[in-house]
């Protein structure tokens, strides 16, 4: 069975013990609207609860893995069956937007990071800002040679995207550089930094990821669960959850500041600023 009424993703079972969840909006560079996030969450729940699945692979159709949040999304949180213990999504001031981001950005990422089975993400092309929220929560990252990772949202007057684990993923200094400059980290550099496990040719990405998933699926699920928990607990002992919480508060200070100053949650000159920096960088 591969169809659950999904319109933004596909759910596949490409090999024994392996579920694959594919972002299927290539015409929009897999921009994440709320429907996509809720479909992803449903797919991850399905794979987690299916005792025949041992490994979950996340992949994306098209040239680019994900361009981040879909800024044209007009859906409301109340259009969906919410998952987290949050409410007040339509409240005025910062209250409503903070609840929304707790639900489908920070809440989903943390939920997916703690899925009880190993997860592998296969990444190609550009991964921008919110796109990293579909990479960093997962256990193993396989990158095509053309993958590029960036979080340019400082240009919009906030600290970074809502799942703030940058220092854990690329190290403190590189985290500052990627945030301060808005520049992308290449697959080769991400590999050197330990942010991605393996770099493969674009044509090999699917095969390589599936082979690794099938290899992992030969292990007993109990051992896999315990190993995953052990590594995640090490990160938690290093303060990962507290880091996310603290940065989330600052993120909403940024949104609130922009709201007071510009009447919108981001600095409206952000996109122009990123283009200007990119031009300067190429001269
Ligand atoms: Zn935000």
Image: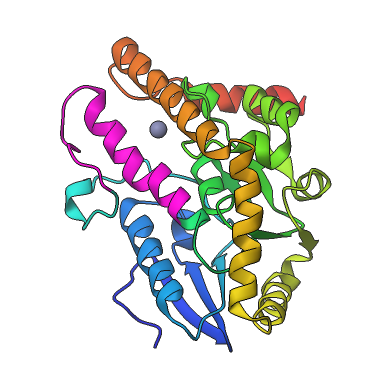
Percent across and percent down for residue 14 are: 56, 85
Q: Quadrant of ligand 1?
A: top left
Up-down relation of residue 121 to residue 257 (above or below) = below
Q: Residue at x 35, y 51 (%)?
A: 33
The magenta span reads 85-111
Q: Residue at x 68, y 81 (%)?
A: 219
The quarter of the rendered structure image containing the C terminus is top right
Q: Is residue 36 magenta?
A: no
Is the stretch drawn in magenta largely helix, strand or loop?
A: helix
Q: For this rendering, which residue is in front, 129 or 245?
A: 245
Q: Residue at x 59, y 75 (%)?
A: 222
Instruction: Judge left or right: residue 2 versus residue 76.
Output: right
Instruction: Judge left or right: residue 235 versus residue 21.
Output: right
Q: Residue at x 64, y 57 (%)?
A: 230
Q: How many marks?
A: 0
Q: Is residue 104 magenta?
A: yes
**Picture quarter containing residue 36?**
bottom left
């Amino acid at each position: 069975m591969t169809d659950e009424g999904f319109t933004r993703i596909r759910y596949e079972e490409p090999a024994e013990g392996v579920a694959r969840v594919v972002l299927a909006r290539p015409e929009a560079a897999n921009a994440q609207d709320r429907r996509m996030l809720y479909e992803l969450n449903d797919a991850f729940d399905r794979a987690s609860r299916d005792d025949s699945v041992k490994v979950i692979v996340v992949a994306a159709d098209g040239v680019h893995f994900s361009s981040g949040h879909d800024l044209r999304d007009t859906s409301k949180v109340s259009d969906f069956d919410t998952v987290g213990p949050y409410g007040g999504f339509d409240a005025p001031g910062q209250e409503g937007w903070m609840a929304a981001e707790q639900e489908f950005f920070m809440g989903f990422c943390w939920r997916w990071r703690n899925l009880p089975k190993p997860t592998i993400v296969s990444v190609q092309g550009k991964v921008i800002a919110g796109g990293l929220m579909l990479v960093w929560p997962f256990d193993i990252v396989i990158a095509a040679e053309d993958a590029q990772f960036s979080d340019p949202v400082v240009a919009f007057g906030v600290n970074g995207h809502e799942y703030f684990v940058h220092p854990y993923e690329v190290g403190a200094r590189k985290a500052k550089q990627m945030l301060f400059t808005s520049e992308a980290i290449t697959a080769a550099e991400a590999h050197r930094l330990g942010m991605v496990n393996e770099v493969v040719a674009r044509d090999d990405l699917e095969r390589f990821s599936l082979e690794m998933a099938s290899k992992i699926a030969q292990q007993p699920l109990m051992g896999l669960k315990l190993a995953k928990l052990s590594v995640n607990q090490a990160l938690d002992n290093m303060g990962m959850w507290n880091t996310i919480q603290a940065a989330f508060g600052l993120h909403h200070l940024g949104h609130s500041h922009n709201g007071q100053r510009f009447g919108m949650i981001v600095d409206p000159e952000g996109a122009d600023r990123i283009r200007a920096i990119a031009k300067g960088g190429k001269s």
